[in-house]
Amino acid sequence: MKVCIMKKLLLVACLLAAPLSAVASEEVALDRAPVNLDSRASLQRGAQLFVNYCLNCHSANYMRYNRLRDIGLSEQQIRDNLLFTAEKVGDTMQVAMSPKDAKAWFSAAPPDLTVVARARGADWLYSYLRGFYRDDTRPTGWNNTVYDKVAMPHALWQLQGEQMLKVEERVDSHGNRTQAHQLVLAKAGTLSPAQYDAAVSDLVNYLVFMGEPAQTQRLRLGMIVLLFLGVLFVLAYYLKKEYWKDVH
C-alpha cells in the first residue's frame, strides 16, 4: 500500500516538473548588467535618460524627485534639468501622458516603473532594452528577443538605430536542425553600439537605484553594524573568561 502511494506521488512530481523544465529550457539567455550603484555619474546619466525617454509614457509614482539628491544632484539641478512633469522637487515622478490618452493609444496604461528592476531584474532589463528589432508584423513595427510580441515601441531607437533579426538554420552531426538568432544593426543610430550599451547600463543602473534608493546606505550601515557586533563579541568573550576564570 505504501509503495503504491509513493509511486503515485512520484508520478505527480514528474508531471509537475515537466512543464517547469520546458519553461526553463525556453528561457532567453540574459546578458549581465554592469550595475554600479556607487557611480554617481552613471546614476545621474541614467536619471536624465529616464526622464527624457521613459517618463513620457511610464510613471514612477513611488519615487520623489528630491531623492535624486542621494546621487549628488542639488535641488536647483533637479529643477533645471529634470523637473518636467511636476511643480515641486518633493513631488513624485508622474507621467506626462494622461490615463485617458494612454487607454486610447495603447488600450491600457503603461506600467509604473518604480520597482521594475526589483520585479524583472537588472539583467532582464539590460537585455530587453538592447533586444529590440524591426518587425513589420507587429502593430508598432517593433519586436523584442527577450519579450516576444512586445506591445511597447522602441523608445530609444534613435540612439541605437534599427536592428534586424537574422535567423540561421543549423544542422548538427546527428541531423538535428536548430535555429540561431542574431541581431544585426541595419541602420545606425546617433550612438555607436558600444555607446548605446553604456547608455543602457546607466539607465538600468538608475532603475535599480530607483527601486530602492536607500540600498547603498542600508548596505553600508549593515557593514558598520556587523563590525560593531564583531568587536562586541571579542569584548564579551574576554569578559566572560575574566568572570569564569576561578570556576572549575
Image: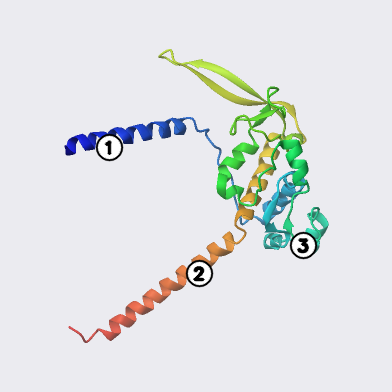
The amino acid beneath tag 3 is Val
Query: Percent from the top left, x then y, of residue 98?
Result: 77, 46
36 is higher (above) or lower (below) than 136: below
Instruction: Name the residue located 55 percent from the left edge and 64 percent from the top edge.
Output: 218
| Residue at image mark 1 | 9
Mark 3 or mark 1: which comes first in sequence? 1
Name the quarter where the C terminus is drawn: bottom left
| Residue at image mark 3 | 89
| Residue at image mark 2 | 224
**Label 3's element?**
loop
Q: Disc 2 vs disc 3: Cβ atoms closer than 8 Å? A: no
175 is higher (above) or lower (below) than 218: above
Mark 1 or mark 2: which comes first in sequence? 1
Few, some or many C-alpha atoms within 10 Å of disc 2 (few <14, some 14-19, many ≥20)?
A: few
Query: Percent from the top left, x then y, of residue 177?
Result: 48, 15
- Tell me the distance, in whole angstroms, between the alpha carbons under discs 3 and 1: 59 Å
57 is higher (above) or lower (below) than 69: above
Q: Disc 3 vs disc 1: Cβ atoms closer than 8 Å? A: no
Q: Is residue 149 left or right of residue 52?
A: left
Q: Is residue 44 left or right of residue 31?
A: right
- Tell me the distance, in whole angstroms, between the alpha carbons under discs 1 and 2: 49 Å
Does the image show residue 157? yes
Q: Is residue 204 left or right of residue 25?
A: right
**Label 2's element?**
helix
Few, some or many C-alpha atoms within 10 Å of disc 3 (few <14, some 14-19, many ≥20)?
A: some
Q: Nearer the viewer, residue 215 or 41?
A: 215
